[in-house]
Amino acid sequence: MASVPTSDRATATMLTLGGLATLGAAVWLERRRHRYDLRGRTVLITGGVRGLGLLLAREFGARGAHLAIVSRTPSDIGRAEDELRASGYEVTAECCDVRDPRAVADLVRLVVGRTGRLDVLVNNAGVIQAAPFEDAQLEDFQESLDTHFWGPLFLTREALPYLRRAPGGARILNISSFGGRVGVPHLSAYSSGKFALVGLSETLRAELRQQGILVTTATPGLMRTGSHVKILLRGQHEKEALWFGAGVATPLTSMAGERAARQLVAACIAGRAHVTPAKQFRLAEIGNVVAPGISAGVRSAVASQLPGPTRTAQGRVRRSTADVGFGFLEPVMPNGASQRNNELGS
């Protein structure tokens, strides 16, 4: 075989290095172009008074944003507002059910009226339901779609006129879930709503970019935010709580809520299209795309180890993990996070 002349190899090497340098410069310039200073900007966060939402509020507040935190649970709002104000953050706190389009319209007008602007919308409000498909009820699917899809849709439509006017552009951060990319056993209702949000979010990314609004789709996996005490269960309630608790209790299958919030806010500021905190969940998402058959087989194997459906009236009753508890796992559950992140209220 004839050898490649040294001069040709050198030329090829130089062209490769030049191409990589050009690509690197393009990436750097793109990121620089999208640098976004939050100081003085208004950030509206639904579900912003506890769990991940409160963690996101702290992160945005630390960067100088005026926070507009929203919850449909009045008793949770005051505690979060007091804490954030004590940290020196500017806060507007409101009660609103994002599933109600008229309430959402009033909310957006009120926030803009009080702060004078709206720059960042964070669609974070959520509800987690765990149940075998045969014990899940139609109302669970309706609730998931109302909260995870229709709520963000209502808010985005109402916020758009103000986001378009935001000096220097605007951001939308849609908090979907790993379960909105990969179907997770016993989360059929939850995943249905989160999948719908991913579809909406990625379409908005394509359409709104030319208007100066960058949409980030976030698909985090299990996080130790303290929200494990708020999971709604059907089926064999105690066993359902145990398997979910086992996933939250270990760093191998979950990540610290604070670290997740930092990554999510950083992705929003940078205007990234997609972010999945934690390497194990990013790899699982990639695996589901590259080898869907193998990914489905793994999930089927997991499903075979989970508690089976009851198909009984008792199994159809919905209970909360706050009432059921986590049995022998209780000592290792991240209950400190529940305390820190306002999850132990009503």
Image (cartoon, rainbow, N blue to C red):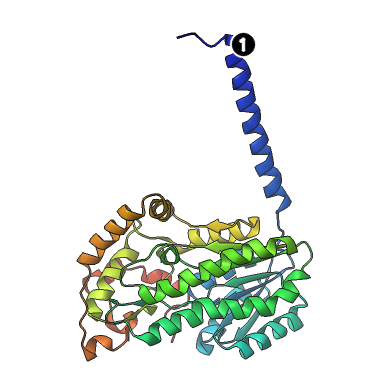
- Give x and y (percent) for residue 244: 31, 70
Say which residue label 1 marks.
7
Question: At 70% from the left edge and 81% from the top edge, which residue is drawn?
Answer: 111
Q: Residues within 10 Å of mark 1 (few under 14, many from 20)?
A: few
Q: Is 11 located above or below residue 19 in the figure?
A: above
Please name whichever residue, 181 or 262, is drawn nearer the observer in this view of the structure. 181
- Give x and y (percent) for residue 18: 66, 28
Quadrant containing the N terminus is top left
Please name whichever residue, 145 or 227, is drawn nearer the observer in this view of the structure. 145
Asked where in the image residue 190 lies, by quadrant, the reply is bottom left
Name the side, left or right, on which 12 lies relative to 41. Answer: left
Name the side, left or right, on which 282 lies relative to 156. Answer: left
Residue type indicated by callout 1: Ser
For the question of whether residue 82 can be seen, the reply is: no
Label 1 sits on a secondary structure element that is helix
Question: At 68% from the left edge and 65% from the top edge, which residue is drawn?
Answer: 208
Asked where in the image residue 154 lies, by quadrant, the reply is bottom right
Please name whichever residue, 286 or 124, is drawn nearer the observer in this view of the structure. 286
Could you tell me how many numbered marks the image carries?
1
Quadrant containing the C terminus is bottom left
Q: Is 305 located above or below residue 241 in the figure?
A: above
For the question of whether residue 208 can be seen, the reply is: yes
- Give x and y (percent) for residue 24: 64, 38
Question: At 59% from the left edge and 77% from the top edge, which residue is drawn?
Answer: 153
- Give x and y (percent) for residue 205: 63, 63
Asked where in the image residue 37 lies, by quadrant, the reply is bottom right
Question: At 64% from the left edge and 61% from the top edge, which residue is drawn?
Answer: 206
